[in-house]
Image (cartoon, coloured by chain):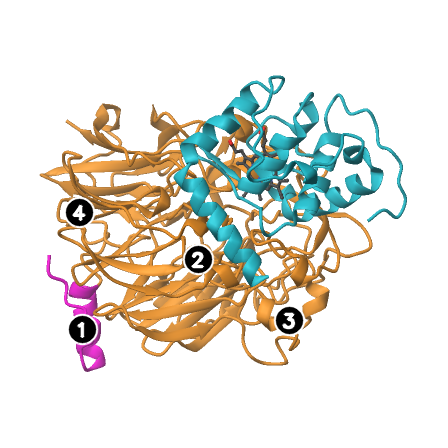
Amino acid sequence: MKRPIRAVAGLMLGAFAMSAFATGASAQDANGNWTEYNGDYRSWRYSPLDKVNKSNIGKLKVAWIHQPGDITSGIQVTPLVIDGIMYYIAANNRVYAVDAATGTQIWEYIPELDADHMKSIFAAYNRGVAIADGKVLLGTSDGRMIAIDQKTGKEGWQVRLTQPAECHGCNFTSPPTIANGIAIIGKTGGDLAQRGQIYGVNIADGKLLWTFEVLKDDPASWPADQIATGGGGAWMPGVFDPKTQLYYVGTSNPAPDFRASQRRGDNLYTSSIVALDPKTGKVVWHHQEVPNDAWDFDAQNEIVSIQHEGKDLIFHLNKGGFVTVLDKKDGSVVNVWQFSENVNWVDKIDPKTGKIGTRNEPTDAEKKIFCPSALGARSMNAGSYSPKTKLWYTNGFELCNSAQTVETQISKLAFSQPYYATSEFGFDAPPGKKASAYLKAFDPLTGKMAWRVDYKNPGLGWVLATAGGLVFNGDLEGYVHAYDDESGKELWKFQTGSGIRAGIVSYMADGKQYIVVPSGMGSLFPGFASSVFTDFKTIRGGAAVIAFTVE
Amino acid sequence: MMNHHRKCLGFRRINILNSSVLMCAVAFCVAAPMAAVPARSQEVPAATRPSDDDLRRSDWIAQGRAKFISACSYCHGSKGDAGKVKSFTERSNWNPQSIHDVITNGRTRGSNVMPPWGGSIADDEIWRIVAYIKSLSTDFKGPIPVENGN
């Protein structure tokens, strides 16, 4: 499919062209493609397809399986599907094009990665590719962006964006976001002694057009001696809204993660939602969820857009366990509601202003316990919003961590060592309780819960809701479940052979609706969480893309 | 620092070329910890290997613990009881050389990734971490008190 991406003069014309063509056929427009990481710019991860539905879900069967053959760190991808072809990325940045109806491989691309990339703690895994202008674009584990030909899989241009050897391995683990011919990507490194950046790259030739410094060069925000190693970054994809012509992204936490006392100031633009002009990389507005963060609370999660009473709103879950609802035009706060059941890092957040109440910070003096943990209220695996039920379906878990801080010399940090500045650190159950996990359905504006399903272990897969009245979710044990979107009643499940840590999507190919589930546990989470959720110790890794349909 | 880094780059390349050989050697050590471990003298000169008594020095254990907490604990838990391997607190007869070598070279097995630390944690510091890890084993004979050691 030809997808013009050149900037069109005139805002109205531009907006029309964007929604009609350049962002591709959006996941919501019923032609059965899945063209962007989070579905489309609204991040609903919702499929308008209903051929698979509550009445025939019992007949959902495996149609084909494709395996990338490399299971290093499992599989984390959200595949894209355009006009009957699926594109997905697997371990060590291998990319595949597969016939979406049969699973027959069309091409594979295996990049030569700098041998050093395995020294990065963010090595090997990747969450997706972006497609524009006949190119499949990926950010690599060794800090480059590469364009490959959508038809042939042949390598086109490449551009080096980070210098991993000089930033403790800061690299790319997520797809770029496409905005009018520009591919925008942020690097990892909220936890590293480095300075976070977001890059705008010209899709036509791979030229770097602009760099956005996530750490604002302003003495009111940062002590001068801290900014060069202040972390930040933006390791999950943002979204480009063709209507507002802005790029929205959630940024990482500042470093050292737990010792906020040495970097007093708000530490802009960390732990924030920022709206950037994609042409220049300049900030149009921002909302900082956690000023001077002391708990590793990135703002990396999905930025979901909905309309309510004639207003364009955004809602967003921070790792700190609160959902913030913003007015999309200027980032002003509409509401804040508490998502996590156990929160003790702050006594409250003002729902009208988003202002943080009294803080409970890690200190050098004693080891204390903080909830939620540095793993967040939920991992980065997005929920799904259904316009049919007006509910947001998301995984979550109740976990805390203990921490005590210590002054840490940058020169003593090992290459692969995060800049945590901790003398004690560990994961714990919430005080007096058991650690727990769940899938919940919420009214995203008020936080009113419609239903919940308890899980033995945190669900680490990305959720899919469909017009067929189904909510698909994967679990650690390897099951993919389908629930009734109104009641949470389980209607179907299937054992995929390994845990699910990837994005479930749906598409049409050859007249049939497919549900595709990449299965294969890996990532850093299992190691981190295994002291409390001990099942993580013994899980098997894997990597398989499994497509289901109803015959 | 920069030179150090280059050297380490070289090591990695060699390791990757010989990865099947290395993996076998490591797997062998793990599967049969009691058996004689093939010497890997080309990478770790015998002279740098501390004695069993050195590995029980209380100051080494304390220094190794501090580094372990800051560089390793989020993947392994503060006592090596978390993570994707058998708990460090349930080990006995664990060959210090193989612990040292996994830390230095890293190890990728199935979906598991253990990053390599050689070249960015000094070798004597890696041995202090080994001392801490050994102190967690079930057959640890207790620390040998040393004050203000280096």
Residue pictured at 59% horizontal, 63% vertical: A254
The Cα atoms of the two marked residues, 3 and 1, are separated by: 40 Å
Q: Residue A505's quadrant in the figure?
A: top left
Q: Earlier in the sequence, mark 3 or mark 4?
A: 4
The chain under label 2 reads: A
The Cα atoms of the two marked residues, 4 and 2, are separated by: 33 Å
Residue under numbered circle 3? A226
For the residues bearing labels 3 and 4, Cβ distance under 8 angstroms:
no
Viewer-closest of A350 and A72: A72
Q: Earlier in the sequence, mark 4 or mark 2?
A: 4
Do the residues at pointers 1 and 2 share their chain? yes
The Cα atoms of the two marked residues, 1 and 2, are separated by: 28 Å
Q: Tag count in the figure?
A: 4
Give the structural element (helix, strand or loop) at label 3.
loop
The chain under label 1 reads: A
The chain under label 3 reads: A
For the residues bearing labels 1 and 2, Cβ distance under 8 angstroms:
no
Q: Is residue B148 magenta?
A: no
Nearer mark to the viewer, of 3 and 1: 3
Residue under numbered circle 1? A6
Nearer mark to the viewer, of 1 and 4: 1
- Quarter in which the N terminus of chain A is drawn: bottom left
Do the residues at pointers 4 and 2 share their chain? yes
Q: Which chain is cyan?
A: B
Colour seen for chain A: orange
Q: Residue A415's quadrant in the figure?
A: bottom right
Viewer-closest of A53 and B128: B128
Residue pictured at 63% horizontal, 50% vertical: B121
Residue under numbered circle 4? A32
Q: Which residues are magenta?
A: A1-22
Residue under numbered circle 2? A171
